[in-house]
Amino acid sequence: MTLALVAARKEELAAVLRIGAWPPWRRRSESAWRQRRAPEGALAFQRRDHMVAAILTGAGREQTERAMSWLLESEKPESILSLGFAGACTPNLDIGDLVLATSLHHIAGNPFDWDPDSLERAPESPEFPESPEFRESKKYEDLTADGNMLEYVRTAVEMNGIDFMSSPTLTVDSLVRTSGLSAWLGETYGVSSVDRESYWVSTAAASAGVPCLSVRSIAYSVNETLPEIATQLPDTPSGGRFAPVLRHGARHPRDVWRYIRALRTARNAVATLTAVLTGNGGLADGTKP
């Protein structure tokens, strides 16, 4: 199998997995994808040509690492495309814009623990770079995107007129829903988007020596605060979200409608990118970036 698509929730790949998303298999009653057996807490799919697999890990570090371990051991992909939604940390990004991660960072804990020095990065090299202390510090090194994949995808989106930004991204342990915190993250750490999984996907891929690129579609702008219901939804890859959203929508219809519309825009951007990258001559055909 050539390419693996990794996302946290089914909503992020819904437009990719639905019937008719792939023109070569357009049928009224036949999907281009079939669901496969997957590890507990995840969902796995395979395209009918066996060239592309997709796995929905669920949100957060633990679920992502468990699903990635299964993917790398059982599917052995040649490259990985980490996809999903993110919040903007800069006013230069609109809903539906894509962020191509040039480097990935992580901050542990909750917002009350964060400070400008808490970003996981390698310290300055000491006088003796091969010392045990320096080798131990390497575990905090920033993750840098695979250069060949980044250039390949950047060229593809430019040629197809897709709005994007190449920039460092940030992964945190809990959802960032307020506009003030999003803006602070961007100004403090120099990142353009924030999510909960991309760092862990890339870490697992790097450990296995598999080229990986993280691409995030902006689901809410830096000036927008998500409705409180967004923090109460389950982290599962699918299910359990419709009823809470429906109940919240009965009380706050405008908030929910704006939220759903933004997610639809972000979802379609992911589908457009994926169709470009997995078409003829793309990553799914074994084309090396």
Image: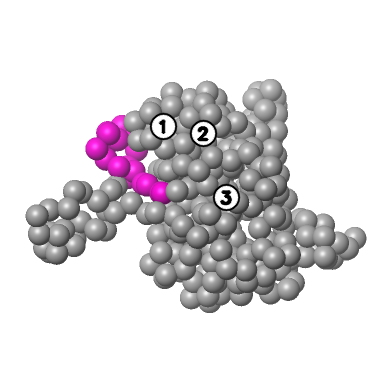
Q: Residue at x 27, y 40 (%)?
A: 118
Colouring used for the render: one colour
Calculate the distance from the C-alpha at mark 1 to the C-alpha at mark 2: 8 Å
Residue 171 in percent (x, y) is at 42, 45
Labelled disc at residue 186 = 1
Disc 3 crowd rating (10 Å Cα; few below 14, some 14-19, many 20+) is some
In the picture, measured across the screen, residue 78 lies left or right of residue 248, that is left
Q: Is residue 30 magenta?
A: no
Screen quadrant of the N terminus = bottom right
Residue 266 in percent (x, y) is at 65, 40
Q: Residue at x 52, y 36 (%)?
A: 87
Residue ID for mark 2: 88
Screen quadrant of the C terminus = bottom right
Badge 3 element: helix
Q: Please, is residue 248 above or below residue 282 in the view?
A: above
Name the residue nearer the viewer: 261 or 144: 144
Disc 1 crowd rating (10 Å Cα; few below 14, some 14-19, many 20+) is many
Residue ID for mark 3: 154
Badge 2 element: strand
Q: First in sequence, mark 3 or 1: give its number.
A: 3
Q: Which residues are magenta?
A: 103-119
Name the residue nearer the viewer: 185 or 144: 144
Calculate the distance from the C-alpha at mark 3 to the C-alpha at mark 1: 22 Å
Disc 2 crowd rating (10 Å Cα; few below 14, some 14-19, many 20+) is many
